[in-house]
Structure formats: structure tokens, C-alpha cells
Amino acid sequence: MQVFINNLTDQFAPVGVSELGTIVHDNVVFPANPNEDYPEVVLNAVTIRHNRPKNIVISQISGRQGNIKEYTGVGDQEIVVTAIIAPKALSAAAIAELVAGAAVNLGGQAAQRILSPVQTAAGAVGLTPDSQNNELLIAIRRLDDFQGSVPIESKYINNILGVQFVVVEDVALEHLQNGTWQARFRLLSDDLIDLGDYGGYGGGS
């Protein structure tokens, strides 16, 4: 049991700090498309909702109470990622101070793991908060326009749900206030599955 707890703790160790100044234990990354259809999309302040519906055929029988249920399989995993996109208003020094304070509870190794990427992200030279948001919003729109399966990187989605590829069903963008946006991604799992006797492989899982 202790080994399991230790592995789980390592798996969800902090990976950075969001634009909101909160510790990030897991983020969602869509790596850049090799054909340059869309650039890398990194979402730090996210919530993830997951559903995996069963395929059940329900038949009504005349004169009988209740229905006949026939389980035929499991549908695609439905994943909703909601992200807050906020201007990077904090300086590298301010975020480093925040991380140093949090490190009292996280421990030295955890602080070291997150300090470097935090300073790099916060010190983006020559980018104003508006231009940072615009670049990310354009990247999200290009990702939404892409027609095909895309890889996704997230410790929870990859390791817990077992999903490595998704199809972006739709993306909804909403401007909140002061240059802050909310982006909601509706995703369907699209990992290869063995078709067995039918031969080959097909998308979906």
C-alpha cells in the first residue's frame, strides 16, 4: 500500500505554476503537429470531466414489466477539458517567491522540479499579456480546425484513463473579463483498437 501511495504521489507531483499563480499538479498539452497544422497548445489551469457510456440495446417485451437489456460494448471515452486562459501578469521573481513559499510544504525536490519551467514561462521576453493570449487562442482555433486524431499529454488522461489520442469534437471560447478567457474542449478518445477477426486496427476506444 505504501509503495502505491508513493508512486501516486510522484505521479502527481507539481509540474509548474499556472497564470493564476496556483500550483499545477497536472496540465493538458496538445503537442505541435509535425506538418505544422497547429502549434503546441499548453493548458495549465484546467479541470477535467470524464464519461465512458456503455452501449446497451434496450428491447421492450409486450406484457412484461421492465425491458430486456443487451450489453454490446463500451463507447468512446468522452472527456471535457475546461481551461482558464489568463494573462501572465506575474513576473518571474514574483512567481519564484510564490513557489519558494509553497516549497515549505512540498519539499526541496518538488520545488526544484517546478522552479525552472515556472521561471522560463514567466520570463517570456517581448510578449505582452494580450499577445500571449492571442497566440494561444489562435493555436486553439487551429487545433479545433484540424480534422483527425491528435496526441494528448496529461498524467491523468494518459495514465489513469489510458487515452493517448483524441478527436477534438468542438471547442467553445468565452471571454470572461480583463483579458481572461475560458476554453472548453469536448474530446473523444481515439486510440487504436485491435479489430481481431475483422483484421487490422481501427480508431476509437
Image (tube, grey):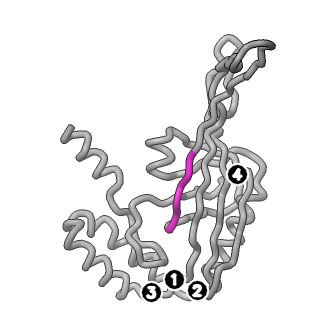
Indicate which disc residue 129 carries: 2
Tell which of 174 and 155 is nearer to you.
174
9 vs 128: above or below:
above
Contact between labelled residues 1 and 3, with CB atoms less than 8 Å apart: yes
Q: Residues within 10 Å of mark 3 (few under 14, many from 20)?
A: some
22 vs 39: above or below:
below
Q: Quadrant of the N terminus?
A: top left
Q: Quadrant of residue 3?
A: top left
Instruction: Name the residue rendered at 65%, 62% in the picture.
Output: 184
Residue type, mark 3 in image: Leu
Mark 1 or mark 4, earlier in chain: 1
Q: CA distance from mark 3 to mark 2?
A: 10 Å
Q: Secondary structure at mark 4?
A: strand
Q: Quadrant of residue 73?
A: top right
Magenta segment's dominant SS is strand
Q: Which residues are magenta?
A: 45-50
Mark 4, residue position: 168
Q: Residues within 10 Å of mark 4 (few under 14, many from 20)?
A: many
Instruction: Name the residue rendered at 55%, 41% in the picture.
Output: 163
Mark 3, residue position: 90
Q: As drawn, is 63 to the left or to the right of 203? A: right
Instruction: Name the residue rendered at 68%, 72% in the picture.
Output: 137
Residue type, mark 4 in image: Val
Indicate which disc residue 88 carries: 1
Q: CA distance from mark 2 to mark 1?
A: 6 Å
Contact between labelled residues 2 and 4, with CB atoms less than 8 Å apart: no
Q: Is residue 47 magenta?
A: yes
Q: As drawn, is 72 to the left or to the right of 124? A: right
Q: Secondary structure at mark 2?
A: helix
Q: CA distance from mark 1 to mark 4?
A: 26 Å
Q: Quadrant of the C terminus?
A: top right
Indicate which disc residue 58 carries: none
